[in-house]
Amino acid sequence: MLTMADLLVVEDDPDAADLLTRLLETGGHRIRQAANGQKALEEALARTPDLVLLDLAMPQMDGPSLLQILRSYLRWHALPVLIVTALPANDPTLLRAQGLGVSGTFYKGGYRPSDLLDRINELTAPAKGAGKSMA
């Protein structure tokens, strides 16, 4: 049996986080949630996720600030990060985050759930078969 990918959803809107979590669980993934960048950093330090789904505009620590910290650690330099945002494509915050290295950008209300799941499955396929520890 394949191991589920461990996904970290970083989203400050509880309804949006729950909706995304339900979608990802239908794809067979294990989900952890963090309501801001600081909580997400704590989650990542406790156990590195296979992939991060990152909102950008959040209190305490925004998405680009979290991404900058993650990329400063060698162990997280190649961690797949998908941005899930309501910001427009030319927003400076989005452009800053994309400049830090992301695996894709999905615009809230503008993507098909199957496209998001397909991209996650592409990015986490090696992790699923690696027998990762659940601890």
Image: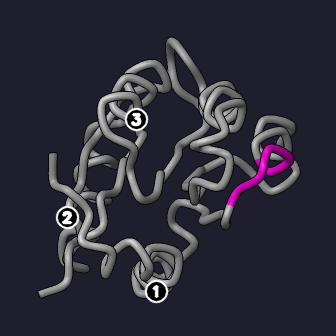
User: Mark 1 near mark 2, Cβ–Cβ under 8 Å?
Assistant: no
Residue 100 in the magenta stretch? The answer is yes
What are the residue bounds of the magenta stretch?
Answer: 98-102
Q: Say whether residue 71 is left or right of residue 21.
A: right
Q: Estimate the x, y position of residue 56 in percent, counting from the top left.
A: 61, 38
Q: Say whether residue 22 is left or right of residue 11.
A: left
Three-letter amino acid code at the position of disc 1: Asp
Q: Mark 3 or mark 2: which is in front?
A: 3
Q: Quadrant of the C terminus?
A: top left
Q: Say whether residue 107 is left or right of residue 64.
A: left
Picture layout, residue 92 above or below residue 41 = below
Give me the residue at 11% from left, 87% from top: 1
Q: Say whether residue 13 is left or right of residue 86.
A: left
Of pointers 3 and 2, the one earlier in the residue sequence: 2
**In what element is the residue under mark 2?**
helix
Residue at the disc numbered 1:
118
Marks 1/3: CA–CA distance: 23 Å
